[in-house]
Image (tube, rainbow, N blue to C red):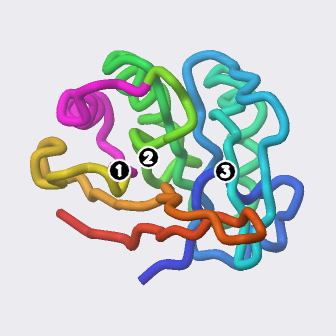
Amino acid sequence: MKLLNASGCLDALTAPEVARSLDVFVTKTVTPLPREGNAPARIAEVEHGMLNSIGLANPGIDRFLAHTLPQLGELGVPVWVSVGGFAVADYADLCDRLDDRPEVEAIELNVSCPNVDDVPASVGEIVTAARAATRKPLYTKLSPATADIGSAGPTTGVTFGVGGSLTLTDATTDGVYTGSFAVDADYQ
């Protein structure tokens, strides 16, 4: 078992000592073009943690490759790059651009971001295109709402992880929502 952060929850360049304490560092999700993300307020503390709605704010793949990734490579911890897109071709292009980068140990396909409007429709098509574009290990981050993980795409050479989405149910009297967080499911 490896200890790693959830994508977007740690800035390794601001807190390198924390990143080095992990077995693997997972980047914030990178998209083809820069994104400002959602308008503030983006983070809310609750009794037992926090909720966030960042909206995939990131510098885009060009700046990430030119500036961020080389610095992450100097940390001395394996780097998994989380990628996100709005079409199947976006995922394939991102995987292709990361394929020959020695700093990248694996790629996470983020198909579970609940706080963006344009989520791609076919996880299976995304996984197929990504697998064809890279030789690196792929991990697919699915929403707990994925009804049938086995139908999400080809399973050869791809690990599916369920997580990252919080299901909100009832608000308590003080306005704090309760809910459940998904656990990991590993399909190889």
Provide residue 43's location: percent of width, then percent of height.
79, 51
Describe residue 13's horizontal placement relative to residue 156 as left or right.
right
Sequence-first tag of 3 and 2 = 3
The type of residue carrying mark 1 is Leu
Q: Which mark is residue 107?
A: 2
The answer to whether residue 133 is seen in the rendering is: yes
Question: Which tag is nearer the camera, tag 3 or tag 2?
Answer: 3
Q: Is residue 114 above or below residue 177?
A: above
Sequence-first tag of 3 and 1 = 3
Q: Which residue is at a point 30% across and 28% down the rendered structure image?
A: 133
Q: What's the magenta region?
A: 119-142
Residue 139 inside the magenta-drawn segment: yes
The type of residue carrying mark 2 is Ile
Q: Which residue is at a point 35% across and 46% down the rendered structure image?
A: 136
120 or 20: nearer the viewer: 120
> Which quarter of the picture shows residue 88?
top left
Q: Which mark is residue 142?
A: 1
Q: Is the C-beta separation of discs 1 and 2 under 8 Å?
A: no
27 or 36: nearer the viewer: 36
The answer to whether residue 137 is seen in the rendering is: no
The type of residue carrying mark 3 is Gly
> Which element carries disc 1, helix, strand or loop?
strand
Provide residue 113's location: percent of width, then percent of height.
50, 41
| Quadrant occupied by the C terminus | bottom left
